[in-house]
Amino acid sequence: MVSTDSRGLLLTSTSFAVFFSFRSRRIKPSPYGSWDLLLKRIDAIDHDNIALIALSSTDGSDLLMAGNENPSIEQPEIWALIERLEGIQCNCTVLVDLAFYVQQWDPGAKAITENLRVSSREIEWNVERLKRTALTGTFEIIFPAYAQHAIETYYSMACQVLNLYKKAKLPGLAALQRAL
């Protein structure tokens, strides 16, 4: 004879099994979308300028403010610069998703994916800091340091993702290089 407690336990166990069975069918195998959708999410930014600015720190020059004879920046220009950095910030999220895409086939990519997540948060923090300084009037002083760092970090992230795809020998590397 089966006791009431055993029947309750059996019923509960069966209910959990059915629930998780249906739930697992709803979860997408690629939660960030297909390859084409990932590439479409990349914002168009001037990648040549990104590389130029990112690599300028190695020779000590500051290209963000170079050539600007009047160091004061007008308010509309400030928000235009921040919007460009927000485009970089959006692309960081896509770079993390692209690394996660590789991680599905190469578990060794997990460390790179986690590093990219940390870098993405750094860029988010830098952009938010620049937004606050634009409101307080200290933007011209703060902009070169935070923007330069955000751009250098983004450039490094893009290089890491490209190297990850080269190492994994995944198809679509040429399309990714064009998009980044």
Image (tube, rainbow, N blue to C red):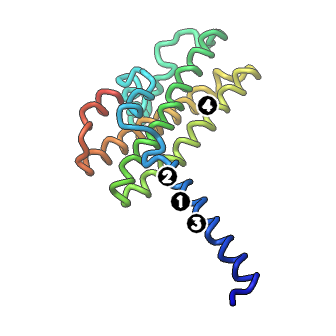
Q: Residues within 10 Å of mark 4 (few under 14, many from 20)?
A: many
Q: Which mark is residue 77?
A: none
Residue type, label 3: Ala
* Residue 63: x %, y % from top left: 45, 23
Residue type, label 1: Ser
Q: Which residue is mark 3?
A: 17
Closest to the camera, between mark 4 and mark 3, is 3
Residue 8 drawn above or below residue 119: below
Q: How many marks?
A: 4
Q: Which residue is mark 2?
A: 25
Instruction: State left or right for residue 1 relative to residue 18.
Output: right
Quarter residue 20 falls in: bottom right
Q: CA distance from mark 1 to mark 4?
A: 42 Å
Q: Are marks 2 and 1 in contact (CB under 8 Å)?
A: yes
Residue depicted at 57% across the width and 32% down the height: 145
Name the element at disc 1.
helix
> Which quadrant of the figure contains the N terminus?
bottom right
Return the residue found at the far front. 1
Q: Residues within 10 Å of mark 2 (few under 14, many from 20)?
A: few
> Sequence-wise, which precedes: disc 2 or disc 3?
3
Residue 61 drawn above or below residue 46: below
Q: Which residue is mark 4?
A: 127
* Residue 69: x %, y % from top left: 53, 10
Q: Which residue is mark 1?
A: 21
Residue 170 drawn above or below residue 37: below
Residue depicted at 58% across the width and 33% down the height: 146
Q: Are marks 1 and 3 in contact (CB under 8 Å)?
A: yes
Residue 128 drawn above or below residue 49: below
